[in-house]
Each structure stands twice: as C-alpha cells, then as structure tokens.
C-alpha cells in the first residue's frame, strides 16, 4: 500500500511524528505536501492508496479534502475512532488533530491509531451484523460523490489559480505528480493532460 | 437563527436529547429528516442557518453532508471542539457522535457543546492572531467548494433516484421543503424549479 | 497473573464486557465483587496481582479503592491512558468509566485498553529518560502509603460494620477470601486472623 | 472560596494557564507548591477549601494526594468530567492532565472545566434521582477515609524526612503553612503543634 502524508502548515511540526508512527509497517510513504487538492489528485491518479492528513484540530484539513470527488475521510482522535472508521466507513483518507489534544505521547497515540486503522478487517462492518447495509451505504456515497462533483479535470480548470499553482509548485509534490501522470495505467487521460498543461504553464 | 436537526437512522433514538439540548436558546428548530441531501437543500434554500446532524460515530453523516457544495461541517465531541470550530472554521453544520462515546450524561455533553458552539465569537479566529488568515482560508474554501461541485440543481438531477425520492418523500421534510421553495426571497430559481418538478413527480 | 474484576453496582451491566475484553490473555480472572475494600484485601493477601475496577465515571471506585494502603490506581479512558499508566505509574489497579462515554464499541475500547495496559514494558518509564526518577517516585509513594495508612488489620477493625459485613458476605467474594486466608504463603498473619474472626462472626 | 493550585514539577509550565483559567471567578487563589502532602495539609488546616492539582497525565498527582485522609479527588479531562464530579463526588480536590492531551487551547479547556466544576449544583447528584444514595456514599467514604488512615499529625511524624522537609521548606508553601497554623479557629491542635515543631527543626 502507498500512503501519502499531507499536513496543513499549522501542524507541520508534527510531520516527523506521523512518519515515525507509520514506519515499519511495510507501506511506501510519500511525504509530500499540505493541501486537500494534493490529496485528492494523488488518490485520483492512484499514485497512493491512502492519505494521512491533518491540521490543528483535524477539521480544517477534513473540510478541505472533502471538497473533492472520491475522497472519504475520517477524523481520528483515538484508536477506537480508527477501529470503527476502518470497519464502517472504510474510506481512503484520515484527518488527524495535530495541535488540539496533542500533548505528551501524542506520537504514541498516532502509532496506536495506525495500529487500529490499517487492518484486514477494513470494510467488515460494525456492529458486524450491519456489514451489508454499511457496504451499500459506502457504494451509494461513492455514487453521490460522482453526482455532486465536477470531474477532477474540470475542477482543476475551475479552481482559483492560486490554489492549483501552490499545489503544483510545491517542491515535494511536483515530482510525485510528474511521476504519477507519466506512469501507466492511466486512470483518467483527461485529468493527466490537464495536469501536464498546468505543470508546463506553472514551471517550477 | 433557524437550525435543522438532521439525524441518521442509526442514532434516531438520540434525537430527543439533541432537541432538548438545543431548547431554550431562542432558536427556531426544524427537526426534519435524516440525510446529507436534506441538510444541503435546507442550507441552499436558506430555509435554515445551521444544521445539527450526526450518526453513530459522526463520521458517516459528515461524509454524507460534505458531498454537497456550500456545506462546511465540524465533528464535535467535546465543548472544546465546539469552541474551536466556532472560532476557526465557522461552518454551517456539525456532525455529532451519537452512539460511540455517548453514555451517561451524553445529553449533558450535547448541552455543553451547544453552549460553546453558538457564540458571538464565531469566526473570530483561534489563536486570535490567526483570525485574518483563517478568514481568508474560509473564503478560499467556499471558492473551492463552488469550483469542485456541480450546482445543487444539477446534483438533484444527477443523483440516483432513490436518494432524491427518499429525501423528498420523508414526511417531516416534504412540507419544510415545499414551504422553503414557496417563500421569497428565492436564492436559486433553477434549484427551486427542479425541486418543484421532483416534488410533483414524486407525490407524497 | 491473577486479576480481580471489581465493579460498582452502577456499572454492573458492563461486567460481561470487561470479562470478555480480558479473555484469551492467559490470565486467571476472579470476578468477585464490588467495593474498594474487596479490591484492597485481594491485593494485600496476594490473592490477585491486579484489580480491574470501575463505576459510572471511574472516579467513585477510584476514590473508594484508594482509601486503602498499597493500592496504586489509574483512571483509564483510552489506550493511550493505559500505555502511559503502565510505563509511568505501574500500579496494581485501574478504574474504568463504565457509563460515562461508554457507548458503541465500548467493549472494543476496553479490549484496546487492556492490549496497551498489560505489557512487558510495565514500569519502564515515559518518556524513557525519566525511567529512574519515576521508579524512585513509585518507591516513595509506597513509603508514603505505609506512613499514611493504618494496617489492613487495624482498618478492618475500625471500618463501619456495614462496610466489612457487606464485603465479607458478598456471595462471589466470601469463598475467594476464605481460600486466600487458607493459602500459604501468608503475607500478613495478623490480617488473616482478623479476617478469620470477621468471617466467623458474620456467617454467610 | 479559597483554592490552592498544586502542580507536580513535570507540569510546572502549565501553572500560568491554570491560574489564568481560575482568574475572575472571585476565588482567593494560593499558588503554592507541588506535592500531595502540601495539598492535604492545606485542606486539613482549612487553609483552603479546594485544591486544583495535576501532573503530566493527572494520575501521578492523584495517587499522591489520595494517600492522605480527607482528600476526595477527581481526574478531570473535559467539562463533562467536571459536571459529573461536582454533582456525584463533590470532592475537595481535582487532578488535571497537564501534558497528555494538553495541546492547542489546553488553557481554554481548563477554563471550560472550571466553568462546569464550580457550580451551586455541587453534591446534587447525577442522575438527579440518585442524589440521596450518592450523598450517603460520600459520607461513608469519609468514614472509611478516617478508619483507613492515621491522623495527619501521625502521618507527618511517620513520613520519610525528605517528604516533610521538601514540603515545609518549599518557598511558596512555608509562609502559607505558617500563617495557617497561626490562624484561629484551629481545627486540629495536635497537627498544628507537630507542624510548628517541624517548621522549627527544618528552618528555611
């Protein structure tokens, strides 16, 4: 599994703690930026399977990343939150509170959260007898997400230039994006040509 | 202020506790349904100023309601969460955890959360010196929300029929919606005519 | 390791969840009563190594059990609490909140707490470089406990009769106590003869 | 009401936040030391009505202060904890977690906790219909505390010299103690003469 770590500026000093808490689990970790747009692009291009993001309270990043289609995000404060999110929501993104409530052993708490989050039980439902309606709920949510959003290519063109430019020129993100659009299989050719166009018009 | 209470089925038994915790604050409360779509429609039609929603963990409703444009939602477990959400995010919706962690005095906790949530300090920033960048962040988020989503009218037409039909035929919601589309000033004529069309083709 | 489960009446319905969360760890579990006195007696007689107790908020049981000498008790709400208590305080008792905050998956949370609590890292300190002052702190606390309390034998004689009688006649506790006083090695002969005297004068 | 603020060394940097969160409530605040013994002495001499203490997790101070007779202590992490402690336990001491979970707006959380803690509803029970058994429980707990502990005078003489000496020579505490033993009415003459003796033999 490939996981991107995406951290709002307000919580940039907690990046090392997240990376350390994710270490040693056999995942490939991309530590590459700080916005909801970056997160959504990496998921859409299948450059990563999962995004671990956060901000001071977790709510800012969550609202930012959830503007985009195909993003399903938890807000995880305790291992129990992670246990339930994995089973019920089985999303592709989590938002962490990295200043509020983040004190002594905050790094340990992150490790305990990831212990509970990355589990083969993902999507098996909680309580277990609710597995099937919860699976249907996730499918319906994905349909609603497609109905409610423009395509990622349309979104990139409609976003304020400051948003796309900031993301595409972010030093740790630009090469990841370039590599993602260059790599087959290509899940969305229109999206990749829009990205290529934007990368050219916003040179590093 | 008009507040809608929107509760997923998994937490329907906590509805009375929410209404009771909201009582006596001088707000007009609409207790009217259970989906993200209902929440978004009420906000778009300006039928309410704020939506209080929730589900078992708070994460399901949050992911549901945030599929729609113009919805900015907190996940509130403690009064401190509410204090910070009001100042930093100043959104128009909150999602409550109504089964997980909801034990003894869960109703009291709701009251303490609402005490901290509905405050004249809304949008004043936290920490205070971050007020201006946080205000800019909220404006940018609203722009991103518009860029990333279709219009509510387009969404209503694109959604699976089961989603729109369930919402529009929900007994406590249908009359609220009918009243909202009939009431001037009309913030979105295309949306109201789509709703009128759907109400006619899905008679109660 | 032998563990007693001691549960105040207000939370008696959570007993099964505690036993289930403790199951399968290779510990011998005594499920035997509901007061601080019982907890302290079992620890003093070395009938158990550890007591898992609780009440509605965890604070009532904690105040009850900590009246007695030689009891060092944590108040554990999350796995992180357990992680830190094991390393820093390394006590012989914990108090759980079994009504407040105990909602959906409360039983899962108990399991995650016990996963973090029973660890070979007990007493190794947190942060690790504080291991030695924390070890000294625990030794000093044990000295203070001995200086501040009467002996358990004196306490049994000084307690209101209703307290001792209730404990000694508690059906699940009386046989455990009888077995404990009968079993060598005897850590405190005065205490065992006081208990034998009280058991005789308060026949089941 | 007179409140002492008693803070373990590990959390000394949070002292200002506690004092600030207590300010403006019309209480007389003594900010005077860092051990369980100091807390217990101030309560026994009626030099204060209430002690606000804490340490990294709250559990160390709690175990320290609860070694002494007549101390009934909560462990408060959220306003709801404070709400319930005031109504159910109505103790004379609280222990705060001042490093674990103490992040952004930790100072605000302290204020919200004190808002809920200091209330005319103290001792009125929760749920309300349990008021009478909870009142009886508090009285029984006070009896047990007297039965289980030596007197404060005996304890002072039995404690390791390093414990009494550290407390009595603590710069902010010594004058408070001297003033307390000099002030009528004297709730415990034996205790005050032991303290006077110790103050003389351990000159500042």
Image (cartoon, coloured by chain):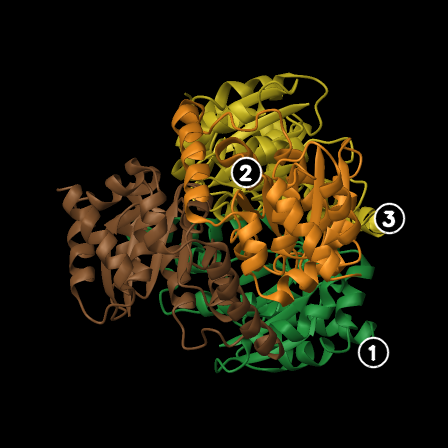
Chain colours: A yellow, B green, C orange, D brown
Please indicate, yes or no, whether residue B113 appears anywhere in the rendered image. Answer: no
Q: Which mark lies nearer to you, 1 or 2?
A: 2
Query: x, y (%) of residue A11?
Result: 42, 36
Q: Distance between the residues labelled 3 and 2?
A: 43 Å
Which residue position holds label 1? Answer: B204
Relative to the observer, which residue lies in front, D37 or C123?
D37
The quarter of the picture where the N terminus of chain C appears is: top right
Which residue position holds label 2? Answer: C91
Relative to the observer, which residue lies in front, B26 or B33?
B26
Q: Is residue D102 above or below residue D132?
A: above
Badge 1: how crowded within 10 Å, few (<14), some, or many (20+)? few
Classify mark 2: helix, strand or loop: loop
Query: x, y (%) of residue C146?
Result: 46, 42
Please indicate, yes or no, whether residue C118 appears anywhere in the rendered image. Answer: yes
Say yes or no: labels 3 and 1 on the same chain.
Answer: no
Q: Distance between the residues labelled 3 and 1?
A: 29 Å
Q: Which mark lies nearer to you, 3 or 1?
A: 3
Using the image, name the chain to which the residue with label 2 belongs.
C
Relative to the observer, which residue lies in front, B84 or D41?
D41
Tell whether label 2 touches label 1 (CB within 8 Å): no
Query: x, y (%) of residue A87?
Result: 75, 42
Which residue position holds label 3? Answer: A132
Residue at 63% of width from left, 40% of height from top? C189
Classify mark 1: helix, strand or loop: loop
Left-right relation of D131 to C14: left
Residue at 35% of width from left, 51% of height from top? D154
Using the image, name the chain to which the residue with label 3 belongs.
A
Using the image, name the chain to which the residue with label 1 belongs.
B
Badge 3: how crowded within 10 Å, few (<14), some, or many (20+)? few
> Residue B173 is drawn in which quadrant?
bottom right
């Amino acid at each position: 599994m490939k996981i991107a770590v995406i951290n709002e500026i307000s919580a940039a000093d907690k990046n090392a703690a997240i990376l350390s808490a994710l270490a040693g689990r056999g995942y490939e970790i991309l530590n590459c930026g700080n916005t909801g747009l970056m997160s959504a692009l990496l998921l859409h291009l299948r450059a990563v399977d999962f995004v671990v993001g956060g901000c001071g309270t977790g709510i800012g990043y969550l609202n930012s990343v959830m503007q985009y289609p195909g993003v399903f995000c938890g807000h995880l404060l305790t291992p129990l939150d992670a246990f339930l999110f994995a089973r019920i929501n089985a999303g592709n993104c989590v938002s962490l509170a990295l200043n509020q409530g983040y004190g002594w052993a905050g790094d340990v708490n992150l490790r305990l959260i990831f212990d509970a989050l990355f589990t083969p039980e993902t999507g098996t439902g909680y309580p277990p007898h609710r597995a099937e309606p919860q699976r249907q709920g996730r499918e319906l949510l994905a349909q609603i997400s497609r109905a409610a959003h423009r395509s990622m290519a349309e979104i990139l063109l409609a976003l304020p230039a400051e948003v796309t430019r900031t993301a595409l020129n972010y030093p740790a993100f630009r090469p990841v994006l370039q590599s993602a659009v260059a790599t087959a299989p290509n899940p969305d050719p229109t999206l990749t040509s829009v990205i290529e166009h934007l990368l050219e018009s916003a040179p590093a």
